[in-house]
Image (cartoon, rainbow, N blue to C red):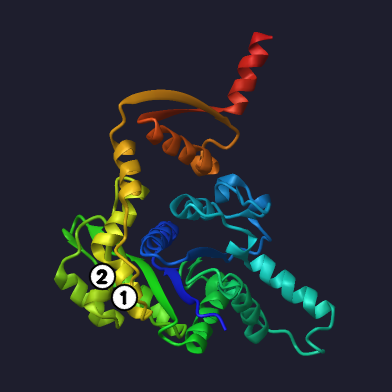
């Protein structure tokens, strides 16, 4: 029987809070403490995979070593952990329903009425545990796409509820990423959006173990106490995630906040050593203090949304830092290039 621990990362209030970066940063810190870690993404859309999605809607389609067309967050996972991902690291609602319907057509359910519970949730739980059951990982971090309250995400949240009950509190925990906005007119941070987000999550039967609060300003101890009281967590389990200059600052910020320590305490795991981020910080130092600059033209069809070419721009960052060089990208639309060629002809 696998002793793999599970960490679920949910989001509330708004999308694009950075669940993928928080998950990748936590995984990096746990990896540096000596644990074998992987991350997977559950996407609530009904498409089978992002391969046919418009890049303007979804950004880059990241292709893994085994040829799977996946979410761009898997690129972040690989860049942070320096280990390959596979088709098992990305699950979509489309894949879940396709699998369940194929089983029904083959008669595997023996004529039973196929329902969201238990058939869809069982398939989600099976997919979540595929990586854990290989025996290769001490910890599997699962990021759930979308925000709490989205109708598309409900089966995933229900599956998490079931897994928390089945695995026990020492083997599965929930990190809820939420927003603590600053209202300039009032001159203060507001906790109500987070309170409502957690309330929505708890209505689905899931109570967060850790709150990670995205914010533009420092969160005071008073606000942490208030969030702890209203959101049913301990004050030390409220973690601040302040806006960073670059996504590569986030592991250091989470280390300062002790996110990895809180997770290990919740999962009853003993650290195999303190996180060693020397190589990471050398890269970060070179990235922030380049000695040279070079300009590279990137020609593309979807340059209005630069996330469509995320892996390319991140490759420029990594290659540039290795050579202590800032890479300035000049974005050129392929259609404008075609027009120039036509005029020349």
Q: Residue at x 38, y 35 (%)?
A: 321
Looking at the rendered structure, the secondary structure element under dot 2 is loop
Residue beneath disc 1: 195
Q: Residue at x 39, y 65 (%)?
A: 34
Q: Residue furthest right?
A: 106
Residue 66: x and y, percent? 67, 54
In the rendered view, tell whether residue 73 sits above or below residue 118.
above
Residue 215: x and y, percent? 27, 59
340 or 107, which is in the foreground? 107
In the rendered view, tell whether residue 311 sits above or below residue 201.
above
Q: Residues within 10 Å of mark 2 (few under 14, many from 20)?
A: some
The answer to whether 296 appears left or right of 220 in the picture is: right
In the rendered view, tell whether residue 184 sits above or below residue 40.
above
Quadrant of res 323: top left
Is there a contact, CB below 8 Å, between mark 1 and mark 2? Answer: yes
31 or 251, which is in the foreground? 31
Residue 97: x and y, percent? 70, 72
24 or 51, which is in the foreground? 24
Q: Residue at x 80, y 83 (%)?
A: 108
Residue 246: x and y, percent? 34, 46
Number of numbered callouts drawn: 2
Work out how far the residue at label 1 is from the one at label 2, CA to CA, in angstroms: 6 Å
Residue beneath disc 2: 191
Please give the label number shown on residue 3: none
């Amino acid at each position: 029987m696998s002793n793999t621990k599970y960490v679920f990362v949910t989001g509330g209030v708004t999308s694009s809070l950075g669940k993928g970066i928080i998950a990748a940063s936590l995984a990096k810190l746990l990896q540096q403490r000596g644990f074998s870690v992987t991350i997977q993404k559950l996407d609530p859309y009904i498409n089978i995979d992002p391969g046919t999605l418009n890049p303007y809607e979804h950004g880059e389609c990241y292709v893994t070593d085994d040829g799977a067309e996946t979410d761009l967050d898997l690129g972040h996972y690989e860049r942070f952990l320096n280990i390959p991902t596979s088709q098992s690291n990305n699950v979509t609602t489309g894949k879940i329903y396709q699998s369940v319907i194929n089983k029904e057509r083959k008669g595997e359910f023996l004529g039973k009425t196929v329902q969201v519970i238990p058939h869809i949730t069982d398939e989600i739980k099976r997919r979540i545990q595929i990586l854990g059951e290989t025996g290769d990982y001490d910890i599997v971090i699962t990021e759930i796409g979308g925000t709490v309250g989205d109708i598309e995400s409900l089966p995933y949240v229900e599956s998490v509820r079931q897994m928390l009950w089945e695995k026990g509190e020492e083997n599965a925990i929930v990190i809820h990423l939420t927003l603590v906005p600053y209202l300039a007119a009032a001159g203060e941070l507001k906790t109500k959006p987070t309170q409502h987000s957690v309330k929505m999550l708890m209505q689905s039967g899931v109570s967060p173990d850790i709150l990670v609060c995205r914010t533009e300003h420092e969160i005071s101890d008073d606000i942490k106490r208030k969030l702890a009281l209203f959101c049913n967590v301990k004050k030390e389990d409220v973690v601040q995630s302040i806006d960073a200059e670059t996504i590569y600052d986030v592991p250091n910020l989470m280390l300062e906040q002790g996110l990895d320590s809180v997770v290990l305490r919740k999962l009853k795991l003993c650290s195999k050593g303190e996180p060693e981020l020397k190589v990471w910080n050398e890269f970060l130092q070179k990235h922030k203090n380049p000695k040279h600059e070079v300009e590279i033209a990137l020609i593309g069809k979807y340059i209005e949304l630069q996330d469509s070419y995320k892996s390319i721009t991140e490759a420029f960052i990594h290659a540039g830092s290795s050579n202590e060089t800032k890479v300035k990208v000049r974005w050129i639309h392929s259609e404008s290039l075609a027009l120039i060629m036509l005029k020349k002809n």
